[in-house]
Amino acid sequence: MARPNRSAGLMAPPARGPLPNRNPTSTSLTPPATHNSIPTKPRKKVLLTPGHSPLDWARLTSLSPTLNGLPPGTPYLRVPPSLLKQYTGRKGKDAWTVLGGKVYNITPYMPYHPGGKPELMKSAGRDGTKLFGEVHPWVNWEGMLEGCLVGIAVEEGEVRVESGLEEMD
């Protein structure tokens, strides 16, 4: 009886075949467009204090689903620029920012931010969507800051209290 060739088992090289098509087919000789999600500036990370890692933030948000700084039961707000400018994170006030048309209180997240508090303060009291997209467009801010949601950004004069997020979507 012939013995099976054990050396050709799991250690055998993979069968040769066509390589998968990893690039879209192109009919022109021009190179493909570059991908925009790579930051143009090198990121500066800071040393976080113990207990302030991204996993610690995830744990905190799962235990405390509301971190927006508003009294419990407060409906989401419609935030005009004049109100947003009051929340700069200075003089003991919270820091609010707009990301994608939604207003977030970023104060609770500051100790957990890998870039440090000064980087977050650049967008406090203003719309930080463009800056956020330039630095780290791959991050899902809606999921990460869900508990910090204050309301939606509106034009001046559109202030009225909403009981839900129906108009946000």
Image: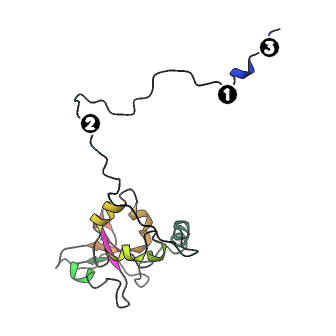
Q: In this picture, is 41 found above or below 79?
A: above
Given contact means CB atoms under 8 Å apart, are the residues at marks 3 and 1 in contact? no
Name the disc covering residue 31, or none: 2
Quadrant where the N terminus sits is top right
| Rendering quarter of residue 5 | top right
Res. 20 in view: yes
Looking at this view, is 55 or 29 the one in front? 29
CA–CA distance between discs 3 and 1? 17 Å
- Give residue 152's quadrant in the image: bottom left
Q: In this figure, which residue is indicated by the disc labeled 3?
A: 3
Q: Which stretch is magenta? A: 93-107
Residue 166 falls left or right of residue 16: left
Q: Position of residue 22 (x, y in %)?
A: 39, 33
Marks 2/3: CA distance?
53 Å
How dense is the environment of label 1, judged by Cα within 10 Å: few (below 14), some, or many (20 and up)? few
The residue carrying mark 1 is 11
Say which label, 2 or 1, has the lower sequence index: 1
Kindly identify the residue that appears in the image at 51 percent across and 66 percent down.
54
Looking at marks 3 and 1 on the same chain, the residue that comes earlier in the sequence is marked by: 3
Residue at the bottom extreme of this rendering: 91
Q: Amino acid at mark 3?
A: Arg
Residue 42 - label = none
Residue that appears at 38% across and 81% down:
74
